[in-house]
Structures are given as C-alpha cells and as structure tokens.
Amino acid sequence: MGFFSAIKKMFGGGEPSKETGKEIPSERPSAPSEQPSDVTLETDSRTSIQASVPDLSTSAAATPLPAAQPTDAKDDSDADLTLRLREAEPRLSAWLAVILEDVEEAGELLWRRLLLLLRSLDAPQDEAQAFVDEFRDWLERMEYRQVEEFRSELQYRLALALDLEDEEDERSRLFVKISNGLSRTREQFTRGLEALFAGHGELDDAFWEEMEELFIMADLGYEAALELVERLKERARKEKVTETVGVRKLLMDEVEEIFRVPRHIVAVNPPEVILMIGVNGVGKTTTIAKLAHRDRMQGKKVMIAAADTFRAAAIEQLQVWAERAGALFHARAAGSDPASVAYEAMDRAVRERVDVLYVDTAGRLQTKVNLMEELSKIRHVLGKKHEGAPHRSVLVIDATTGQNALSQTRLFKEAAGVDELILTKLDGTAKGGVAIAVAMQYHLPITYVGLGEKMEDLRPFDGGDYARALLGQNSQSEA
C-alpha cells in the first residue's frame, strides 16, 4: 500500500484527493578525501522510505537504533501518542507538531517518535529505520542539535517521502517562501504599479506607455515589456475593461498564463538522463545536489557525473554535495575529456540500475563554438550508450543577473538545446521580473526556483503562486 493511501486509511477517509496545491545555511564544503586521479569516485546511496520502491534488499543495511528510553515524566506511551496522532488534523504539520511536542533536541526520544509515526503510516520497518538513520547521520554532519535548527528540513523530507508535497499545508509553506523571496522585487514593482494606477483613471495611451516603462524597469527588457503590454491591451479589450482599477487582475491572469505549460509525456526508459548546463556561479552545483536530494527522498537511486573537468575544485565540490544528497558519484581527474566521463557514467548507470543520472557540464563561455562542440559531443555519447539520452537539458540561471539571464538562455538554447529552466537566487533579488521575460521570449517552462541555501529551498515553480506573490495577493488556498 502506498503511504498516501495509508494516511487516508489511518484516518478513516476514502480515496486520496487529487488536490495540487529549510534552510541548509550557507555551508563551506569540507575537503573531500584525496582520490587517485585515475579512479572512479563514488559514494553509496541509502534507502528512502518511498513505498513505490519494491526491493530494498540491495540498499545499505541500516544500523538499528538502540531502544529509546523515556527521558522525562512528560513522555507519552506509544499508545497515547498514536491516539493523539489519530485525533490530530490529517496534515503533515499537525502530525509533526505531535511528534515534536516536548522534544527540544535530537536524541532517542525523537528517533523513537519518528519511527512510531512512520510505522503508524504502514511504513515497512526497514524503510522507516533507513529514513531515521539517514536523517540522524545528516544532523551529525551538519552539527545540528536543537529542533528549531532542523524542523523545516525534517518536514520537507517527510513531505517528499510520504508524497505529501502537494497537500494544502505544504503549498502554503511554499507560497510563503516564494512571497518572501520576491519581497524586494515586489516592493519595487508594486510601488510603481500603485503610482501608475493612482495617476490614471481610464486606460489610454499614456497609461500603457508608462506601464511599458515600468515593465522595463522591472527587468523584463524592451521586447518582453512591449509584448506584455500588447497582450494586456488585447485582454482588456476582450473583457471590456476600461478603468485602471481592473488591470491588476488582468495582469495577474496574464502572468499566470505566460507560465502555463502544456502537458507532455515524461515517461522514459531508466535511467533518466538529465544534462545540467549553465555558466559558472549560477548555483548549478548546489542545484544538482538539491534535485538529487529530492529524488533520493522519493526512493530513487541517483548518480551524479562530474563532466565539468575544467576545474579540479568543481569536481571536489560536486563530490561533497553528492555525499550529502546520498547519491552515487562518478568523476575522473581534472582535465579529462568531459565526453569520456559522461560515457563512463552512462555505462555505469545502466549497469548499476540507476534511476536518475545527472550530468554536470562546464560553464565556460569563452567562445560559443567551443561550448557547442563540447556539449554536442556529450549529448552524442550519452545517446549512443542509452537511446533517447539525454532526456532533458536543464539550464540553470541566476535571477540576480537580470537581463544577463536572457542572453545566457539564448546562447545555451542555440548551443545545446534547452528543455526547461531552473531559476536560482530568487530570494532577495529586485530582479525577479526576469522570470516573466525569459518565459515569454523563449517559451521555456520554469520547473524549479531556488529560494535559499538549504536543501528544501529548491521548490517546484508555480506560475499562479508567482503571479500572486509578485502582485502581493494571498495564496490560492486563502483566496
């Protein structure tokens, strides 16, 4: 039984609904152990608690936790705690509040209660134990002890592992993150918008000209600003809006429409191969780790290949992040042929039955010709070993660069082909409007946004939430 169904059964509900809708502080990677330059580097992944993984026997055996002893008089018996879980509102945050009550720091009481929660949701003992062990190991590496240091990360991991990321409570948490991340962009944009609305009553040429200037100042760029104004004019005409007071809703609807992505077939023959591209400094390495972390929490076996061989430091940094995410890692010495690294990683991923392979690539942009040749060669060798690979080319761009993000998108789309975008460093930038520009100009979906340094801060992108957060509206669940 899947965990989502088990949750509904636990509370006496019917079929699961189909509703759709942390911080790792900035860390200095510890120096990885030295490896011979001609050997493959790898780390072992652990088992997640995702019920869809049928065979967990091949994963590293989890070390059993010692029996937990009550630590104070307030500790509840298992029966009492289970009763309180059943009586709680059927939401992940509510269950977590019960589990963490009177728990101030990581220790045996926390591990015991987490195991009880997972067992209450029909999680097999070995999967539950593996989840707790992996989280405990992560806390030790991060040197976190107090609950407030890791509570958000714990909820994020449980949401992924229990397939509850789309529940209303989690969507509300995501909206808050997006809204907070866009605060600087919104402050600048909405101030100008309010002044524009206040200065005009009717929709006339002067109003549209000023709105176009406002969009340009918000880093949409000239072409995107002009197109957006024309689309708003057409929408206003169709909906018979003649006063400026009605333009705010038109704008929100139009922005949401810009980000709407048509459905497409996503199934692939495993391993799924994802080519990660983008210039140096955009956060590509940490984004790969965060994506791998998401996959690991969903029960997938993940490998990361370091095909950016230009800098030795890049290989070492990626290895550290792979270890943190619990992913396999494949690399060669700095200066090796990137296509050879990709080919070997592909061969190994097939042989070891990996579910997802992320291939990191160099971010050098000295010449467009070199970039095209290197990426084309990598794509060729991947496809030669595994038909259809790479299945996705993901471009990582930095929201703080504003209009530079547009030129990077154009260059990489021409050089390597781009299937989707991930927008990093959206938190704290005044240039968040570039998301609209890049989606309009290149018609590419934005799949994830980076809202901070922690693993949980890479979140699925939702155009509606973005539009509401940008314009200072409530989340959909509160509307």
Image (spheres, rainbow, N blue to C red):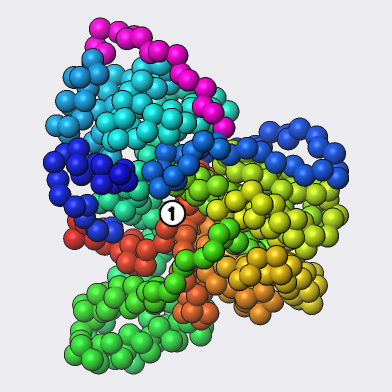
Q: Is residue 356 left or right of residue 202?
A: right
Q: Is residue 374 positioned above or below 128 on the image?
A: below
Chief secondary structure of the magenta span? loop
Q: Secondary structure at mark 1?
A: strand
**Residue furthest to the top:** 73
Rendered image quadrant of residue 77: top left
Residue 75: image location, x then y, percent: 26, 13
- Total marks placed: 1
Instruction: Tell me the residue at 43%/34% (across/down).
Output: 127
Rendered image quadrant of residue 376: bottom right
Residue 259: image location, x then y, percent: 40, 73
The boundaries of the magenta stretch are 60-76
Residue 57 lies in magenta, yes or no? no
Residue 445: image location, x then y, percent: 47, 71
Q: Is residue 223 positioned above or below 186 on the image?
A: below
Kindly identify the amino acid type of the residue bearing the numbered disc 1: Arg
Instruction: Tell me the residue at 28%/35% (across/down).
Output: 121
Q: Is residue 428 visible?
A: no
Residue carrying label 1 = 459
Instruction: Tell me the residue at 18%/26% (across/down).
Output: 84
Q: Is residue 41 positioned above or below 193 on the image?
A: above
Q: Which quadrant is the N terminus positioned in?
A: top left
Q: Is residue 131 visible?
A: yes
Q: Is residue 207 left or right of residue 145?
A: left
